[in-house]
Image (cartoon, rainbow, N blue to C red):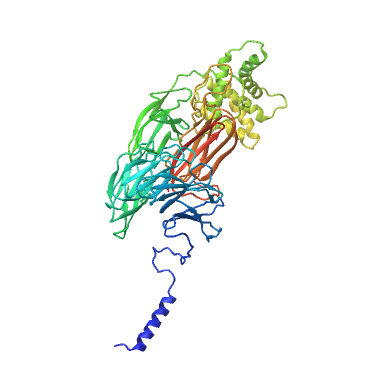
Amino acid sequence: MLNKLSLIFMFLFSMFVFLTLPAVAQNPDSIPFAPAVNYGAGDKPLSVFCADLDGDADLDLAVANNGSDNVSILKNNGDGTFASAVNYGAGDGAFSVFCADLDRDNDLDLAVANVGSDNVSILNNGNGMFASAVNYGAGDYPSSVFCADLDGDTDLDLAVSNHYSHNVSILKNNGDGTFASAVNYGVGYYPRFVFCADLDGDNDLDLAVANDGNDNISILKNNGDGTFASAVNYGAGDGAWSVFCADLDGDNDLDLAVANAWSDNISILFNLTQSIGSISGTVSDSLGGLLGITVDLFDNTGSLVWFAHTDPSGFFSFDSLNAGDYIVSIVTPLGYVADFESRLITVTPNADSVVNFMLHHLEVTSSQRSMGYWKHQVNVYLSGKGSAQESLANMSKYMSRIKTHFNDNLANPVTIFQVPQPATGRDSLEALQRLLTVNKDGTANDRAKQQLIALMLNIVSSKLHQTTAVSQDGATASQAVTYCNELITDPDPSNDEIAKDIADNINNGLLISAGIIPTTTPIIVYKYKGGSEGDSEGDLIEASDVPKSFGLLQNYPNPFNLSTKIEFGLKNPGFVSLNIYDVLGRKVRTLVSQDLPSGYKSVLWDGKDDKGLEVASGIYFYRIQAGDFAESKRMLLLK
């Protein structure tokens, strides 16, 4: 038997060992935390939400106090410590609190579920202060509230789990922070908690509800308009109390994590929905793949989803597409005809749907004209003297094609022909005349541009096919344009003379010596990007360049991982704002805030906020405002 002195010694030794151990157990899976620091709230606090409530870029605390029927606001001092609580009255038995911008005034409001008064209290914010609660009826014993855009109108609605009425109440936002009457949907027994997330990958928010009474999770799919299908139940642990949705296994869908109050465990339910597929293919002619061909992707309603451009092998792809029907369409370039220009393709989950396009050369007899020929045509129409061989309508079409085939070519923009907008047909002719007219003081660069614009006119007028060999070693007219443009735009003035001679010889029907135009120059198919090539001789701004109406396209790719592209069309010039918002309605990033001319625009979002910090995975909204036009769309960031 150990004596008393031995026991004391063993106790003191064990305490010494304990106190000298590292503060964190040597477990590679452990996450170190400092000791708790406590801050007073109200009576019986049951729920807490962290958000920037006073607009100072740090996160404050909102606490629902069940015993004192109020909400405590603890403002962050800027260093992770908090000021004393300020309390605001809610309903009877405040049980759950959620912070979100419910009235679109760029600050965060409070939504509080009150179990005693069977309602939800809305407290509007202004500079971190809150107005008196406005209450909206829910079901019996509302135990949680979640704010989300359930009907796709970009304002935040309320989903409320009602413990004793075994249902979920949906209160749609009227657009101003007030709410319509509750619409109820049945779930399991004694629901405790509701979470809103896109569980089936169809870009609307579904409901996941934890049911304490029958130990399961109810999933209610959104019909796309904020109404919901009947609940489908999935087993969890004993006393399913709360649920959270996140991509836990990295497969780009949202899984469920459920806290079970009575079995003392967490249930993980992996999402088996696999609704993401892709479309890919090639665009080729008899010689192989074609670079720079525009491929458009439309949904089954005919709305443009995205577009791509073929790589040097003619390959294109559209990734991360929701399952369903799409139309894939190519924009046939000058001098070609396609077996078919559009195909209906069905995207199936976890599969790549392949569609290939074959182009054939149109027969074009080379009959290119000299620079002097094109200069004469322009001078006739501007001076009104002499006779022209090309009609004014055709000249208008040629200039229009130069802009759309060469200026707007994403693979290699050739932008020597510039016309300030807005422009008339005469404005465009005068811009062309300035390129074609070089006086004795003109530079070699001016003369190179003079010959290059004549070469481009020969191509767009079908006097020279862009795939025609123009050199002894087989370089094509397309390669000649690309190479001349490189020589003209590089800083070496001696290359301007080379570019001038190449274009001049081709325009006069002479074959370029081997080795002058590198045969490794990319073969770019200068193509028409879209819209209609008008035949009128008036305004040369095409339908593809200036939209007939304002519009905001769906971002692509969507869902996305690193970055996504947002395109929009401006019918009129003016001030434009384009902002990113999170699901709580907080502005995350300003992408555009400036005056812009009319036309099609695009901007890239890199998944970062205005501070340059990466944002978390989840649903975000982007909203454009241009004059009276405003539109919003939803996107999903997955990491």
Task: Name the residue at 51% across, 26% down.
Answer: 549
Q: Is residue 126 above or below residue 528?
A: below
**Residue 459 location, x and y as percent?**
53, 22
Q: Is residue 499 above or below residue 276?
A: above
Is 91 on the left or on the right of 591, as rendered? left
* Front one among 171 and 2: 171
Q: Is residue 303 left or right of residue 479?
A: left
- Name the side, left or right, on which 395 lies relative to 437: left
Considering depth in this image, is 84 or 30 the residue closer to the camera?
Answer: 84
Quarter of the figure with the N terminus: bottom left
Residue at horizontal 56 percent and vertical 22 percent from the top:
400
Image location (x, y in percent) of residue 36: 46, 65
| Above-or-below relation of 605 to 283 | below
Residue toward you, 118 or 636? 118
Q: Residue at x 35, y 87 (%)?
A: 6
Count the numbered circles shown: 0
**Does residue 479 appear in this view?**
yes
Q: Is residue 237 left or right of residue 612?
A: left
Where is residue 350? Give x, y as percent. 33, 41
State the image coordinates of residue 551 (x, y, percent, origin top left).
50, 31
